[in-house]
Amino acid sequence: MASVVLLVLLVIFLTLFIKAAYEIASCYFLTPRRIKKIMENQGVSGPKPRFLTGNIMDMACLVSKHTSKDMDLISHDIVGRLLPHFLTWSQAYGKRFIYWHGMEPRMCLTETELIKELLSRYSKKAGKSWLQQEGSKHFIGRGLLMANGDDWHHQRHIVAPAFMGDKLKGYAGSMVDCTSQMLQSLHDAVELGQTEFEIGEYMSRLTAHIISRTEFDCSYEKGQQIFYLLTLLQNRCAQSSRHLCFPGSRVINESLRLYPPASVLPRMAFEDFKLGDLHIPKGLSIWIPVLAIHHSEELWGKDVNEFNPNRFATKSFSPGRFIPFAAGPRNCVGQSFAMMEVKIILAMLITRFKFAISENYRHAPVIVLTVKPKYGVQILLTPLSS
């Protein structure tokens, strides 16, 4: 009897062992090799990956090299600084290429029509990869940003009403009140003789105050611990992975074009599908280099790295080339909130102050989850009343 029990246990153990071994082999060897062959047959190749680490070290070295020094001039030509691997590999392998994040194959996609199709048509067939979810689960969990499928749909359905219609309009009063308090604090500081301000700190506190009032129904003082933790969380997560005119939103849009919040936009294929002339195999991650697309001379013209809000005087440009908040069903749920907020803040700010960049400002954009100024933004403020 005992020998029979031992035999059953042995069979169960061997079955589980073989299953686990196959899953590991499939994840780290069989599936990547299958995807690599499928894409190479379609003429899509890329840099040779190292065993297990892929091209991670290549990317890290390139980024470290190009961000180790501040920029000499205040230039908006920042793709080579923040996405140097994209420039290197796109020049070597063309618009479409594959690089490897460990054993995860990632195809770089810059063709705007295919981007539009991917984000709008295949939102249910592509989402966040297991590697992304695992890498961020201890920082941002499995919330809306990292959810997929029914889980994502459920969370989006719950969150979306807070950023729509009459609910959104009702936030305007709180945004004005919070901004008025911030402007008064700036004015008081100027009255005491201060002229230079790190405006980023003020804007961070202001946006935290606004969200505390509108979404958490509390004051900034009560909600500040939440945002301290969120800021700390963002930094740690990044360490683990690395003259005004007001027609429409031209100034804001041009700023978002030059400095989009997210430098890249990832999607993983959950099943095989056809994207333009490409067969996309299950398991392939597609990475859209938003920053590079926003700085593409082919798409925006020779003045691509110049601040020119008038380029947004018309919307007659191809879809997929301006995507600061992504696009399609999985676009940023809070983009209307954010746009209303920035319009109110900017409109109120320029009616109270004139400002200029300080000579102490050092231009050194970096990526800490989002694109940020490494040393903040130092500006000189002068009340218009003076």
Image: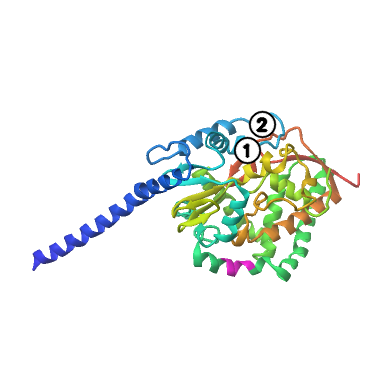
From the image, tell me which residue sits under label 1. Answer: 79
Q: Amino acid at mark 2?
A: Met
Nearer to me, 14 or 38: 38
Quadrant of the image containing the N terminus: bottom left
Identify the image quadrant of residue 67. top right
Q: Amino acid at mark 1?
A: Val
Nearer to me, 188 or 244: 244
Name the chief secondary structure element in magenta: helix
From the image, tell me which residue sits under label 2. Answer: 71
Horizontal side, residue 14 vs residue 223: left or right: left
Estimate how packed mark 1 is, as few (under 14), some (14 to 19) or many (20 or more) residues with alpha carbons within 10 Å.
Answer: many
The mark found on residue 373 in the picture is none
Q: Nearer the viewer, mark 1 or mark 2?
A: 1
Q: Earlier in the sequence, mark 1 or mark 2?
A: 2
Image x and y of residue 349, in percent: 81, 50
What secondary structure is marked by label 1? helix
Q: Which residues are magenta?
A: 156-160
Horizontal side, residue 74 vs residue 282: left or right: right
Residue drawn at (63%, 67%), measured in percent from left and top? 160
Identify the image quadrant of residue 194. top right
Q: Is residue 217 visible?
A: no
Is residue 256 one of those drawn in magenta?
Answer: no
Q: Is residue 108 visible?
A: yes
What secondary structure is marked by label 2? loop
Residue drawn at (70%, 37%), measured in percent from left and top? 76
- Tell me if label 1 and label 2 are in contact, CB under 8 Å: no
Image x and y of residue 355, in percent: 82, 42
Estimate how packed mark 2 is, as few (under 14), some (14 to 19) or many (20 or more) residues with alpha carbons within 10 Å.
Answer: some
In three-dimensional space, the C-alpha distance between marks 1 and 2, rounded to whole angstroms, equals: 12 Å
